[in-house]
Image (spheres, rainbow, N blue to C red):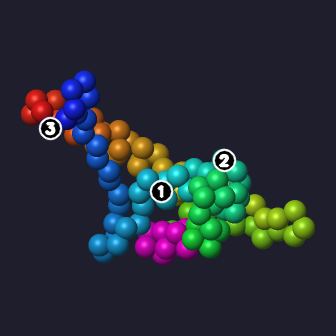
């Protein structure tokens, strides 16, 4: 089972899908939060260690599958552009936080109930 002195724990992940295709989960949640923090898709991608193109592709796919914009983009000149989250993105992040919180509590309770 487990080594002496180690504690068995349960872990779980949730994500949202549209028509069987992933649209939102932990990585995309992190991307949106970093865009909010940095004001830049490029800076958020760098902080995550992914290419800008991949981050942009994630945003584009999420927006198409969800049917609403998540990121306001302003093209920039010499100083670069600026990005911010839409109100719909802010709401999505809040709801996903609440979903994860309730989900993790439920899984942890069930785990304790089963007395592994």
Chief SS of the magenta region: helix
Image marks 3 and 2: residues in contact by CB distance under 8 Å: no
Look at 75% across and 61% down and name the residue there. Answer: 82
Question: Would residue 25 appear left or right of 115 to someone viewing this image?
Answer: right
Image quadrant for the N terminus? top left
Q: Secondary structure at mark 1?
A: helix
Q: Secondary structure at mark 3?
A: loop
Q: Which residue is mark 3?
A: 1
Q: Position of residue 7 (x, y in %)?
A: 25, 29
Looking at the figure, which quarter contains the C terminus? top left
The span from disc 3 to disc 1 (Cα, nearest Å) is: 31 Å
- The residue positioned 46% from the left and 46% from the top of the image is 94
User: Label 3, label 2: how many angstroms apart (C-alpha)?
Assistant: 42 Å
Q: Which mark is residue 37?
A: 2
**Image point (67%, 62%), residue name:** 41
**Disc 2 residue crowd, few under 14, some 14–19, many 20+, Cα 10 Å:** some
SS at mark 2 in the image: helix
Residue 66 or residue 108, whichever sits in front: 108
Which residue is at the far left? Answer: 114
Q: Earlier in the sequence, mark 3 or mark 2?
A: 3
């Amino acid at each position: 089972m487990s080594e002496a002195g180690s504690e068995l724990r349960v872990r779980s992940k949730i994500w949202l899908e549209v028509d069987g295709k992933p649209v939102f989960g932990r990585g995309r949640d992190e991307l949106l939060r970093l865009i909010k923090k940095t004001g830049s898709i490029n800076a958020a991608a760098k902080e995550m260690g992914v290419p800008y193109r991949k981050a942009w592709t994630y945003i584009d796919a999420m927006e198409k599958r969800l049917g609403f914009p998540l990121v306001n983009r302003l093209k920039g000149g010499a100083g670069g552009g600026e990005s911010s989250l839409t109100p719909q993105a802010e709401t999505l992040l809040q709801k996903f936080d609440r979903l994860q919180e309730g989900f993790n509590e439920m899984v942890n309770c069930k785990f304790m109930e089963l007395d592994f």
